[in-house]
Amino acid sequence: MLKRIGVLTSGGDSPGMNAAIRSVTRTALCNGLDVVGIKRGYEGLLEGDLVPMTRSSVGGILLHGGTILRTARCPEFLRPEGVNAGVSRLSENDIDALVVIGGDGSFRGAQELHERGVTVVGIPATIDNDMAGTDCTIGFDTACNTALECISKLRDTASSHDRMFIVELMGRNAGFLALETGVACGAESVLVPEIAPDIKSICEKLNYAKQRGKTHSIIVLAEGVMSASDLASKLKGQGSYDPRIVVLGHLQRGGAPSCFDTVLASRLGAAAVELLAKGEKGMMVGRINGNIVSSPIRAAWESKRELDSDMLRLVETLSI
């Protein structure tokens, strides 16, 4: 019988994680369950860094960025003995089920626990938006808005100084963040890992724009393609370009979550607890076509999400 659940955040932080923690905690308490927060992800689980969660302990965190449980990478959990130790820790602390909030790496750890008999449900949270089983992950919308705000300011100075800016965004090996932001900011070019970059074509486009009298441009580059400095070097090799480089980096992970991410995290947190209450295990919750759905945790990485080809064409159409 389900009496006590644990909740942890793992991997890279993303805006909205606190809203998810709050939702999991309060939904569980409303269902008569005890809740234990596990600090620093799987690392904290192995070290027994646990704290009881109450209604008041999650008060006032809804719109705070980061995660009050903190997070960490845990190399030990990549090994069978580390996962086995995690199973033992959960049993020793009478934790009947675990809610894992994080990206696909965190979900792989959750799957390992599931295969060893632990009742686990996952909530997808990463700014990369690269997980299947959901149309959007917690934190993606906020990261896009953060990047858009920064690039809007760069556009002002690019226009004032007749400059070209290369803006490098995060996203690991996926281009969702770069593509969404690139369309929103009106970038002249968007480079994503899913498509091999055509430097010659980019230069021809820049030259055509210059001939039309355009004096500034923005290139949005996903980190999985190459570094901004490497792209700048390649462009210089093709012409007399003198681009300025801006790497937004971890700035994209911080800040208060957007309304969309806050609501998404709240809905997914409640749905995760409801799945556990029904006896479901080895599942993840997600949002598809506006509806909250569930699917096997493995789907998060076994099914590859594809970039929207219409969005890619839109970049080319609108940047002429």
Image (cartoon, rainbow, N blue to C red):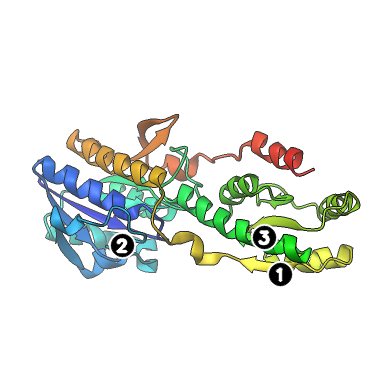
Q: Circle 2 is placed at which residue position?
A: 41
Q: Circle 3 is placed at which residue position?
A: 156
Q: Nearer the viewer, mark 3 or mark 1?
A: 3
Q: Secondary structure at mark 2?
A: helix
Q: How many angstroms separate mark 3 from mark 1 (CA)? A: 22 Å
Extreme residue in the front direction:
160
Q: Amino acid at mark 3?
A: Asp
Q: Is residue 94 left or right of residue 172?
A: left
Residues at badges 3 and 1 in contact (C-beta under 8 Å)?
Answer: no
Report the residue at 43% width, 51% height from top: 139
Q: How many discs appear?
A: 3
Q: Is residue 152 left or right of residue 102?
A: right
**Residue 236 image position (x, y, % from top left):** 84, 67
Comes first in the chain, label 3 or label 1? 3
Quarter of the image with the C terminus is top right
Comes first in the chain, label 3 or label 2? 2
Q: Circle 1 is placed at which residue position?
A: 229
**Residue 48 image position (x, y, % from top left):** 20, 67
**Residue 18 image position (x, y, % from top left):** 30, 55
Report the residue at 73% width, 50% height from top: 189
Q: Amino acid at mark 2?
A: Gly
